[in-house]
Image: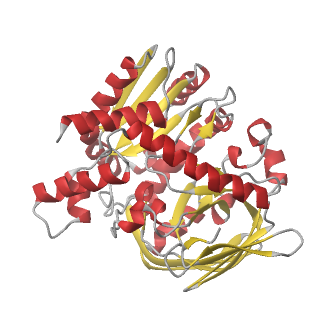
């Protein structure tokens, strides 16, 4: 591993991602596979003048041990003090940087009911913490660390060492780390996304029509919806970019007004398993039917989490010519694959994607069409054959994407 490149990666996460500033407190979450990058992120936080940096490490093999060995009746135990600890950090405005190596299908052999039990218990115990993120006061970023497991999954025909090097090279390229000044490159990219965001906001579309192979969907947008591209902004005006990489511009669909059929164009990694060849039928905003060529039971488990899990919480636009798409790779992790393709998310909507949403109650956002759920699971629908047309309140049609590319 090129240590200089690792330092540049950390600088982007700290200075552009969470945009840590002098006096900020930070929590850095990582897994053991990502430890080299975690160390550089912590060092970078101190360099920019952080007041405090707390590091929390997890390990996928240790997590696997619980799924494999714990008694069934203990799987839904989540200690109250853990939720209290997380809330204390939120109250004290500890901004979040999360770095991990994708677990891929490490948990594929685990019974779905055991995974659901563990994850649902954690979601229920920490659901009340959403309000701190909704307020926009916590800056955060998530990023991925190339591991041997991930490299072998993406490049199964390459020797292990070559596969890992190749994956690092493409991650550095997509994340703009291989430029002379990655921080400047990200500021320029953010500016371009903001130009698209402003145009979409100015249209104030009533609904979007998605058309492509296996897809014919009408998606109304929430009242007072707000498009977000690139950086978000805290209430005191500090910008941060929550995902590295990011190519999307997203907003809030009306959870009660989505109708038609849609087919996913890429596999989905969720709950430790890969779902392939799947699609949904929506009526009045709700999934009423679905299919999957592989691991359909995972979708069934997702839909059983709560009522909002069958409705949409996000619609995101990404041109087919994005750097992730141009790579021609399936990364098998949502953080990267969603940036190759237009996508939707089942489940929870982001408060910031409704105008004034950060200052509204959950009931007020729901009245505008915003969805509430414990889950937020992105699935990809874009590609070179996708057309999207926006319709204004007076019925006028406006091309948004044609053959997968921006039409404006």
Q: Residue at x 24, y 51 (%)?
A: 168
Q: Specify the quadrant of the image occupied by residue 357.
A: top right
Q: Is residue 97 visible?
A: yes
Q: Is residue 371 visible?
A: no
Q: Position of residue 382 (x, y in %)?
A: 52, 72
Q: Position of residue 330 (x, y in %)?
A: 35, 67
Q: Specify the quadrant of the image occupied by residue 294.
A: bottom left
Q: Residue at x 68, y 59 (%)?
A: 308
Q: Residue at x 43, y 15 (%)?
A: 49
Work out which residue is located at the far bottom of the displayed protein and give it: 213
Would you say 117 lies left or right of 155 here? right
Q: Is residue 137 above or below residue 336?
A: above
Q: Position of residue 21 (x, y in %)?
A: 50, 21
Q: Position of residue 296 (x, y in %)?
A: 47, 74
For the C terminus, the image quarter is bottom right
Colour convention of the picture: secondary structure
Q: Is residue 233 above or below residue 262?
A: above
Q: Residue at x 32, y 40 (%)?
A: 180
Q: How many marks?
A: 0
Q: Specify the quadrant of the image occupied by residue 34.
A: top left
For the N terminus, the image quarter is top left
- Name the one closer to the observer, 312 or 242: 242
Would you say 10 lies left or right of 347 here? left
- Name the one closer to the observer, 148 or 86: 148
């Amino acid at each position: 591993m090129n240590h200089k490149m690792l330092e540049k990666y950390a600088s982007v996460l700290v200075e552009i991602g969470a945009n840590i500033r002098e006096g900020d407190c930070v929590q850095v979450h990582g897994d053991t596979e990502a430890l080299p990058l975690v160390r550089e992120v912590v060092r970078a936080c101190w360099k920019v003048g952080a007041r405090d940096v707390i590091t929390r490490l997890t390990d996928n093999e240790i997590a696997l041990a619980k799924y494999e060995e714990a008694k069934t009746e203990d799987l839904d135990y989540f200690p109250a003090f853990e939720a209290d600890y997380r809330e204390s950090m939120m109250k004290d405005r500890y901004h979040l940087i999360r770095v991990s190596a994708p677990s891929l299908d490490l948990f594929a052999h685990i019974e779905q009911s055991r995974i659901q039990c563990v994850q649902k218990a954690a979601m229920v115990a920490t659901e009340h913490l959403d309000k701190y993120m909704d307020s926009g006061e916590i800056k955060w970023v998530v990023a991925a660390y190339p591991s041997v497991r991930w490299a072998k999954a993406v490049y199964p025909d390459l020797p292990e060492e070559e596969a890992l090097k190749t994956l690092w090279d493409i991650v550095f390229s997509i994340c703009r780390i291989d430029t002379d000044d990655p921080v400047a490159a990200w500021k320029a990219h953010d500016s371009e996304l903001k130009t698209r965001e402003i145009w979409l906001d100015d249209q104030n579309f009533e609904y979007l029509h998605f058309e492509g192979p296996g897809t014919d969907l009408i998606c109304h947008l929430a009242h007072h919806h707000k498009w977000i591209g690139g950086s978000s902004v805290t209430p005191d005006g500090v910008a941060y970019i929550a995902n590295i990489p990011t190519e999307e511009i997203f907003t809030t669909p009306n959870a009660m007004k989505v109708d038609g059929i849609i087919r996913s164009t890429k596999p989905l990694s969720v709950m430790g398993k890969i779902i392939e060849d799947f699609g949904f039928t929506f009526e009045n905003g709700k999934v009423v039917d679905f299919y999957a060529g592989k691991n359909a039971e995972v979708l069934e488990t997702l839909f059983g989490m709560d009522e909002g899990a069958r409705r949409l919480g996000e619609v995101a636009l990404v041109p087919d010519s994005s750097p992730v798409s141009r790579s021609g790779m399936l990364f098998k992790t949502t953080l990267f694959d969603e940036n190759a393709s237009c996508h939707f998310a089942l489940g929870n909507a982001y408060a910031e994607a409704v105008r004034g949403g950060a200052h509204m109650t959950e009931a007020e956002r729901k009245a505008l069409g915003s969805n509430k759920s414990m889950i937020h699971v992105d699935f990809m629908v874009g590609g070179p054959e996708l057309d999207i047309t926006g319709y204004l309140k007076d019925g006028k049609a406006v091309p948004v994407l044609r053959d997968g590319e921006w039409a404006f």
